[in-house]
Image: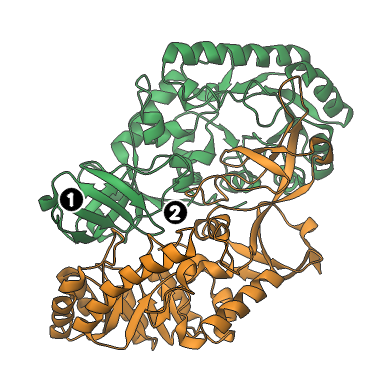
Chain colours: A green, B orange
Amino acid sequence: MTTIDRLQTPALLVEQSALRENLRLMSAALPGPRLRPHVKAHKSTALAKLQAAAGHHHFTCATIREVEGMAAAGLGADLLLANEVLDATRLGLVVTSGARVTVAVDSAETIDAASAGGVREVVVDVNVGLPRCGCAPEDAGRIADLARAAGLQVRGVMGYEGHVVAVPDVDARRSGTEECMQRLLTAHSLVGGDIVSAGGTGTYAVNTWANEIQAGSYVLMDTAYGALPDLPFAAALSVLATVISTTAPAGEIPGWAVVDVGLKSLGMDHGNPTIPGGTVWFCSDEHTTWQPDDFGSVRVGDRVRVLPAHVDPTVALHERMYVVDGDDVVVDTLPVDLRGW
Amino acid sequence: MTTIDRLQTPALLVEQSALRENLRLMSAALPGPRLRPHVKAHKSTALAKLQAAAGHHHFTCATIREVEGMAAAGLGADLLLANEVLDATRLGLVVTSGARVTVAVDSAETIDAASAGGVREVVVDVNVGLPRCGCAPEDAGRIADLARAAGLQVRGVMGYEGHVVAVPDVDARRSGTEECMQRLLTAHSLVGGDIVSAGGTGTYAVNTWANEIQAGSYVLMDTAYGALPDLPFAAALSVLATVISTTAPAGEIPGWAVVDVGLKSLGMDHGNPTIPGGTVWFCSDEHTTWQPDDFGSVRVGDRVRVLPAHVDPTVALHERMYVVDGDDVVVDTLPVDLRGW
């Protein structure tokens, strides 16, 4: 039995109780195939197996590597690569291995790639307002026809309302989502098929138009989604750090401490991490300098939990997650085995 | 013979000519042990071997894993872990294996850790103005005495002027560096030893007070350091991307394109990447949305080179770098084998 005192830092920790509660809340709200968990948030087949145990057997992936790893782990019942690819050769090999793989298409080129690579099923990716991938809603029927003409089965549509998932006011988030989903439903009427896939953790409860939600962050959470007061999910993820240096207050300058968790062990695109009981000043490659509220209570060698601002890229920097219980006992290790491309 | 057209994207590219020229320029300016290359910038023993071939056999590391990997690759002649650690057990094993390992200390606790772990040599880390690790200059003698009392050999001092390495004006950078280095020399007079280690790519030419410079970024460079007009080093690193989607201009809205390089394949702490010939709008996990200057010239399937804002954390996200020549032929593959902790 290992406690976190024995872990080398930086170490990614997942609180078991929060993880379980997040899984429970989401599977109660969106049971079974109503949720298509996005594995990009955790990049771990071991964690995906917990989602499968909670009733979700259809998964969303962002990369070919994620599709390959999920299939190899026996989680290939229905894998949606919610992204465009121009070389689907590796996806075709996954299909040959017996997994079900569906890929997003939004152009003649991506349809050709899917067909040439040996993928048999697609969804039409629709631009619902986020300026990223996806065809115009009114063009979705043409894309579907192109796909069918290339011998592909068209399972439906997807469209991600990524620009509204973090709108603070839940009513504004709902009305923004509705506007996006009207575009997706317009496209669906032109495309057909069973799938209307959309959504994320921020809109899982308000997106009542899609028939499956691609939420991923809910299971671990981060400080960005944690700022939405209506979300019931608890922060499960932290990065365990060791205090490696302290500098006492001197005149006007407050005392500070340094931990061995820096921007190479934290996703930084949403800004600096949070350290409870202190104020973060800045991050370097392998350091975070912060000002403890009570300088005298911090000693070199102390362990501190650093809360990343964005969970997805944080997890992708680590080789494994340690699941810990309330007594700081490490009860499980989840390899982060879906990294890379 | 593989060309970059055959690479799966995202793929980290290193331009051979720029790499060679950067190595040549630096070894001419700071020959042999005057440079202690920082391997955190590239995390690759293969690239470190190119630095050794250029005459530099003493290296700087930021993590225990980097020390272990360098020693295992036969590059352990003189490894400085320029960082504090509270558990030096693994470092002691590297010493036992025959490599020379020196670790930074700035407190009784880090001295105890070095001694208990089996490390025999240390430098005193001095706060020269950057609020991070390091003791006060006037306290450096006491730290050195503590280390010697613990049976450790004190090789000298180090102190990183990280807050001035990116000052745009070179004269202001030099005078800022001088101020920092006076603190370091004060500490050195109290500590003794042969080593006065400091500096980075931004101050490699103006820091004439330290007797060894810990520059790392020079070898690959990034857009942040590239903004300093006096630095002679060329941008060698880019992330090869594929255009996976385009959306044509519509009324007031300009056309945009999306590549498959996003914030999981880019260090984001210095902000968005640059795409020559276009303007980056935003990055998602596996996408960057950008506006080409000439929309009509961009096609789905095109290859694009994305320039990261910060090289160090970008490299740490990838498994390997591809060295390419002027004809886009892949002439070498450099594993990024020093990742993790």
Which image quarter holds the C terminus of chain B? bottom left
Question: The numbered mark 2 sits on a residue in which chain?
Answer: A
Q: Quadrant of residue A112?
A: top right
Q: Nearer the viewer, residue B222 or A30?
A: B222
Q: Is residue B119 above or below residue A323?
A: below
Image coords of residue B87 (percent x, y): 26, 69
| Residue B71, image x, y percentages | 44, 81
Looking at the image, is B205 positioned above or below residue A188?
below
Q: Nearer the viewer, mark 2 or mark 1?
A: 1
> Given the image, what chain letter belongs to the residue carrying mark 1?
A
Q: Name the residue beneath numbered marker 1.
A: A254
Q: Pinpoint residue A179: horizontal percent, then vertical percent.
A: 60, 12
Label 1: few (<14), some (14–19) or many (≥20) C-alpha neighbours in 10 Å = few
Instruction: Tell me what residue is drawn at x 53 percent, y 39 percent.
Output: A39
> Residue A49 placed where, x, y %?
48, 40
CB contact under 8 Å: marks 2 and 1: no
Amino acid identity at mark 1: Pro
Give the distance between the C-alpha atoms of the residues marked 2 and 1, in whole angstroms.
Answer: 32 Å
Image point 75% across, 39% down: which residue? Answer: B293
Nearest the eye: B323 or A157: B323
SS of the residue under disc 2: loop
Say what amino acid the circle numbered 2 marks. His
Q: Reading the chain from its start, which is encountered first: label 2 or label 1? A: 1
Please, which residue is most extreme toward the front here? B171
Q: Which mark is residue A318?
A: 2
Secondary structure found at label 1: loop
